[in-house]
Amino acid sequence: MRSVWDTTVRGRAAAGMGVVVLGAALSACSGSDGAKPAPPPSRGTDAPQAGGTPTPATHPFTGGAKGLANPVLAVKIENTRPALPQSGVSAADIVYVEQVEGGETRLMAVYSSKLPKKVGPVRSARISDLHILPQFGRPAFAFSGVQSKMKKYIRKAPVYDISQESAGAAYFRSGDRRIPYNLYADPRNLLKRAPKAAKPRDIGFRFGDAPEGGKPTRSFTARWPAATMGFTWSAKQKRWLASWGGSPDRAAEGGVLGGRTVVVQYAKTTRSKFHDFLGSYTPLIHTTGTGRAVVLRDGKAYSAKWSRPSESGGTAYTTADGKPMNFARGQVWVVLVNDGKPYTP
């Protein structure tokens, strides 16, 4: 996978020369798919924000009208049984589900339109995060830490590092859980440590009326080597209710997690150079290029395609006949699964 930091910095002088270095380094550690860069898709705008960045007409993450100029915060959250129920996930604009070591999953929750009072359990970052996050510009990125040989990639990545190591006062331990599942953070306090975090911008999502077609669907199960997550349509709540391992995926604040739109994105999963202390290798999820997807909205499943030519731009989702795949307005889940059978690299 060729990184945006290596291929798009010319003509984007504001990105800085340090970004180029990371592109070469990340490409070396994670391979290259030869994807050529392309500018992010355009959308309507209103008045410019401070610094010249246009303010979106609607929030590009949710299609709503709130928080159009709020900064972007991404937080890594544990997604195994000892971490449940999680805090703050229900308030996220976007929830990414990513495979990690041992065939388990971890969440990356992205906030902008609103913030919860607390979020967690906060866990460590992975190399795939650094390939997903450039589309947001330079967001604030909260995580508990990383293994030592990954620190140089974090330092050079286009993110504001507000990890526990860098912004410790924004984190706290809960007394009713054991380490490492008891680390939480105050999102407002986190963002005080990143006053220049990027404002929301177009990442390829389109919101509006559902396209024609679609297959009436009551539920869908996403699978990884050691985990499953289900999504069941609730006509009453007009959203997909999440389950984890066959049980309702409840929020610490009450209710069941889930989104108005769930994108099951099939992406090639390979072995990165990183591994945990047990010797299990960290998966690298290839989120640039093209592939297939299933989009769940309004009680239907739509066969779709995804395309992301470069890491600087977002992902375009289209129907089988090439038309934009509109999402329902509200929270979006992007569930990243291997393109093929569940696979442990």
Image (cartoon, rainbow, N blue to C red):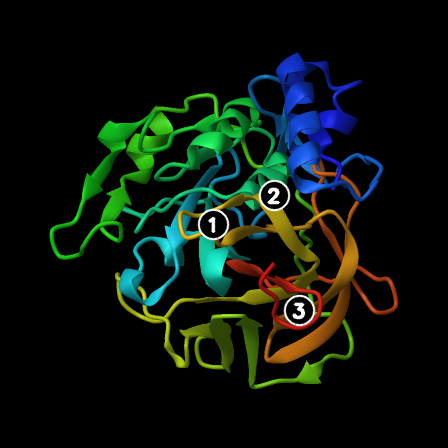
Tell me the kind of residue under disc 3. Answer: Val
Marks 2/3: CA–CA distance: 19 Å
Marks 3/1: CA–CA distance: 19 Å
Residue at the far front in the pictured view:
279
Mark seen at residue 295:
3
- Can residue 269 be seen from the camera position used here? yes
Residue 258: x %, y % from top left = 45, 67
Marks 1/2: CA–CA distance: 10 Å
- Up the image or down, 8 lies above or below 282; here it is above
Query: Under tag 2, what secondary structure?
Result: helix
Name the residue located 61 percent from the left edge and 72 percent from the top edge.
297
Residue to which mark 1 is pinned: 108
Residue to which mark 2 is pinned: 132
Residue at the far left in the pictured view:
175
- Up the image or down, 247 lies above or below 45; here it is below
Q: Do the residues bearing badges 1 and 2 touch, measured as CB atoms within 8 Å?
A: yes
Q: Residues within 10 Å of mark 1 (few under 14, many from 20)?
A: many
Q: Residues within 10 Å of mark 3 (few under 14, many from 20)?
A: many
Query: Under tag 3, what secondary structure?
Result: strand
Residue 71: x %, y % from top left = 47, 33
Tell me the kind of residue under disc 2. Answer: Ile
Q: Quadrant of residue 138?
A: top right
Residue 165: x %, y % from top left = 32, 28
